[in-house]
Image: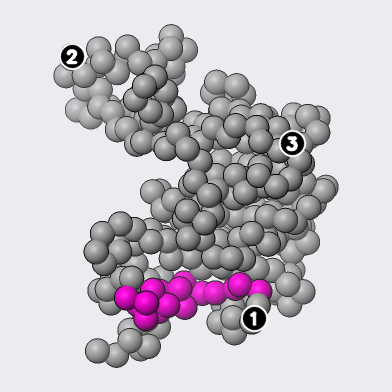
Amino acid sequence: GDDIEEMCYSLITEKQKQQFEEYDELDFALLLPGIGRFRANYYRTLGDTAAAFRIIPIDVPSLDDLGAPEVYKSLIKREKGLILVTGPTGSGKSTTLAAMLNEINLHEQKHVITVEDPVEFIHQNKKCVFSHRGVGEDTASFAKALKYAMRQDPDIILIGEMRDKETIEAGLTAAETGHLVFGTLHTSSAPGTINRIIDVFTGDEQPQIRAMIASSLVAVIAQALLPKLGGGRVAASEILVTNHAISNLIREDKVHQIYSQMQLGQGDTGMQTQTQALLKFLKDGKISRDIALQYANRPDEVSKQTVM
């Protein structure tokens, strides 16, 4: 135990030590020269210090590297609005967002501010100018960083986690006032994501929040990483791309009707339900039926359409 604690403490700053000793939890990014970057989490277990490390690739992946749906390239060409990438921890949200920003960096001259806890992928300025801000290091909180971001003349803002009322409101306002905003939540479906945002607010506040979402939401990508047959992993994505009909459903408190709109596929919009994504992977021989059922939001739908 003492050896691990000594090793853990040797990797962090005095300020981070104080944070860890106060809260018994610490999330941060770590660069070990010649080895790589890591996302680190320190915590206590039975009074001892424990740590988990996750490798962050030094090279930012491209959308093509990830085999991402073609619609992602058209979504990121929007001048303003809110694009949400959601899913459980470890579902590749940060990687998808990094690939989207990488695509923009290759083709457009923009000022991009990222606010993360901790900063994961570090983008080199190509056509864009990046300002990476780490919560706890460069700024006190997501909400504070967003408040000041408005004065820093960004075109694009990445919000690492939209978890509280203040941050969500600031993100929606930024999207409404001419910025392209990317954010993440830990939700597993596109309609569920919209409900999660609305439910953060009180009943009196909800009509206004529904109106803000209806006018600013561009897309929700809810993804899960599935084990692939023959090794590796593949991202099954539920993709909601808003249109006039969907914006009206959000505004009128009829989010429960969005799923049936998505099932229609909407032709060339790139919209798809998670079930449609899973069935395509099954048809292409990328995943097993058992895996499809295990990860499905609606296993009954998958089951009905894949009779043994």
Vertical position of residue 59 compared to residue 96: above or below = above
Question: Label 3: which residue?
Answer: 111
Q: Is residue 271 magenta?
A: yes
Residue type at mark 1 is Gln
Task: Give whichever of discs 3 and 1 has the lower sequence position.
Answer: 3
Residue lying at the far top of the rendered structure:
14
Instruction: Return the residue nearer the eye: 239 or 22.
Output: 239
Task: Give whichever of discs 2 and 1 has the lower sequence position.
Answer: 2
Q: Where residue 239 sits in the image (x, y, percent)?
A: 56, 67
Residue type at mark 3 is His
Residue type at mark 2 is Asp
Q: Residue at x 44, y 51 (%)?
A: 92
For label 1, the SS is loop
Question: Label 1: which residue?
Answer: 266
For label 2, the SS is helix
Q: Residues within 10 Å of mark 2 (few under 14, many from 20)?
A: few
What residue range appears in magenta?
Answer: 269-285
Question: Label 2: which residue?
Answer: 2
